[in-house]
Amino acid sequence: MGKSAERWFSFDSIWVQLGLALLLATTFTLTLGPRLLAAHEPAPPPPVLDRMVTTERPRGLFDLEDLIYMVRPAELGIGSWEPGQFADYRLLERGDEKQPGEERYLRDVRAEVLREADPADAYTAQFGMAFRPMHWLRIAGLHAFRGRLEETYRLANPRDLRITEATPAVSYQDGYIPFVSTEGPQEITSGYELREGQQVELQVGDGSLPCRTFEVFLLDAGSESGDELVGKLWFSADVAPLGIVRLQTQREAVELIACGKGGEAAFAADMAPLIEGASTFTGFCHACHGETFHERIYPPH
């Protein structure tokens, strides 16, 4: 090999050094590069989850709202409602499988009677009144969606709080389309029973309140024991509108703070057209999530 060829293939040759550099750069790009880039990419945001979003839940994990609608205040001593009656509660989380029963404060909840239903209201005009008189009831703060509190409006009577086509539940959150439910959970319609226990004194604020106690059973639940215990209720006829002093499920509880009677409250401004029949624009999108709740935007845009 001549001297010129030796210089060409020598490690000192600029051409050999450029070739080695190109080979190393290509190896880095194909192997280590993607790993290093992935390590510096921001982590994807966690999914937004809310227990009211899904229509399914494991047996035994009853929603507090389900149990509220199982109570019939008139049968337990609250025969009628008056506009302005209210009860304030603490919503508590009751632990999980690792720490069952350990309670943690979440937020305040209010149940209040807004006004007596008008025969000209959209639902009473269409379906009539199951009982007389009917009232509009609001439960605020029991649910939250994407970190914002939600209100539930109920056309109801203390004789029966169950959701039907004539006595709907309307979920509302500022900035979202009102969402109308005309059917309660399947578990409620399949049969349940309140079994009374002993009367107890329950601490409320600085005093105590005598309460009737009940265990709520789902009948013939398919378990080995037959009926399934799904909740417990402490009830007083002195606590309008619902009579609930404390109500608990396996995972949640509401506990009375105070009750009384104020002035007649008003519907949220965006709810009034729906109640009065001036608007029937309600709905939700489940195109992306099957039967799960996706968006409720108001006004539409």
Image: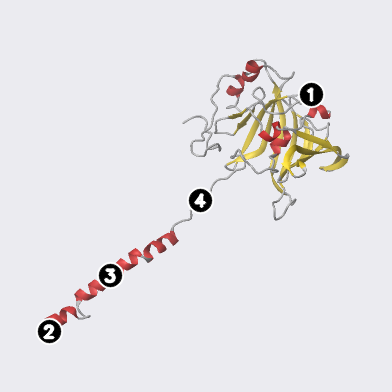
For disc 1, the neighbor class at 10 Å (few under 14, some 14 to 19, many from 20) is some
Q: Position of residue 275 (x, y in %)?
A: 61, 22
Instruction: Examine the image and state in which quarter residue 144 appears.
Output: top right
Identify the amino acid type marked 3. Leu
In this view of the protein, which residue sits in the foreground, 223 or 228?
223
The residue shown at (76%, 24%) is 82
User: Which badge, 2 or 1, comes first in the chain's sequence?
Assistant: 2
Task: Give the CA distance from mark 2 to mark 1.
Answer: 112 Å
User: Which badge, 4 or 1, comes first in the chain's sequence?
Assistant: 4
Q: Nearer the viewer, mark 4 or mark 3?
A: 3
Q: Position of residue 271 (x, y in %)?
A: 60, 26
Q: Is residue 20 above or below residue 225?
A: below
The disc placed on residue 23 is: 3
In this view of the protein, which residue sits in the foreground, 21 or 230?
230
Task: Give the CA distance from mark 4 to mark 2.
Answer: 64 Å
User: Which badge, 4 or 3, comes first in the chain's sequence?
Assistant: 3
Identify the amino acid type marked 4. Pro
Task: Give the CA distance from mark 4 to mark 3.
Answer: 38 Å
Residue bearing mark 4: 45
- Badge 4 element: loop
Identify the amino acid type marked 2. Lys
The disc placed on residue 3 is: 2
Identify the amino acid type marked 1. Ser
For disc 4, the neighbor class at 10 Å (few under 14, some 14 to 19, many from 20) is few
User: Which badge, 4 or 2, comes first in the chain's sequence?
Assistant: 2
Residue bearing mark 1: 80
